[in-house]
């Protein structure tokens, strides 16, 4: 598909990509550092991320659904996403409030939990670094304040 070639030619670092199918044609949507890119019928469109008003996660893959609303009233509606992590795509564009995550305290020694809400920001940053390829999964585990550290 020529969309992959166009995607490779974007001079921006791409963080997330989803692939939607509409009328047997693939549509790619990618998130860069400051822009969001749409490749449809081999035509590249882009918008600044700051113009995004709302992102609605409806369902995940297969047949994922996502809706992106812009401040000029334009809506990018994806109704048959076949590849990509739809929820992570939404979180990258408009992160939810991390203090409202469903973390609950448990007894020490049980499954690792978030005991201090101040850790939520740090864990979220670590997760983004790991998903962007700056740190490995092992480094994520070592730096995560929630996981117990044996022998430390």
Image (cartoon, grey):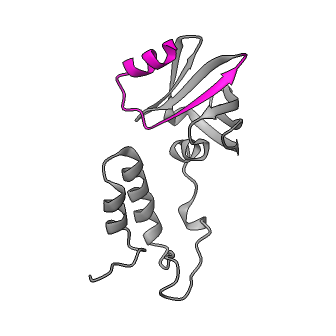
Query: Residue 125: x percent and y percent?
Result: 40, 57
Q: On the rendered structure, is 55 left or right of 134? A: right
* Magenta extent: 1-23
| Above or below 58: residue 96 | below
Give the residue at x 34% y 46%: 133
Query: Residue 83: x percent and y percent?
Result: 59, 34
Instruction: Return the residue found at the far left.
Output: 152
In this view, the residue in front, 140 or 32, is: 140
- Quarter of the figure with residue 60: top right
Query: Residue 11: x percent and y percent?
Result: 34, 23
- Quarter of the figure with residue 70: top right
Q: On the rendered structure, is 95 left or right of 32? A: right
| Above or below 55: residue 75 | above
In this view, the residue in front, 78 or 112, is: 112
- Specify whether residue 17 is painted magenta: yes
Query: Residue 136: x percent and y percent?
Result: 32, 54
- Specify whether residue 16 is painted magenta: yes
Give the residue at x 51% y 44%: 92
In this view, the residue in front, 96 or 104, is: 104
Give the residue at x 58% y 72%: 103
| Above or below 148: residue 72 | above
Quadrant location of the C terminus? bottom left
Give the residue at x 43% y 63%: 123
In this view, the residue in front, 87 or 99, is: 87
Instruction: Return the residue found at the far bottom.
Output: 107
């Amino acid at each position: 598909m020529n969309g992959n070639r166009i995607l490779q030619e974007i001079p921006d670092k791409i963080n997330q990509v989803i692939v939607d199918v509409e009328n047997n044609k693939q549509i790619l949507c990618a998130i860069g550092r400051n822009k969001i890119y749409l490749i449809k019928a081999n035509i590249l469109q882009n918008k600044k991320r700051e113009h995004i008003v709302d992102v609605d996660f409806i369902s995940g893959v297969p047949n994922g659904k996502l809706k992106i609303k812009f401040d000029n009233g334009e809506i990018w509606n994806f109704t048959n996403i076949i590849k990509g992590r739809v929820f992570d795509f939404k979180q990258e564009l408009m992160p939810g409030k991390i203090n409202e995550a469903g973390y609950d305290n448990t007894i020490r020694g049980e499954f690792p939990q978030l005991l201090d809400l101040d850790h939520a920001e740090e864990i979220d940053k670590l997760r983004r670094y790991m998903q962007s390829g700056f740190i490995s999964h092992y480094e994520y585990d070592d730096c995560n304040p929630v996981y117990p550290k044996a022998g430390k």
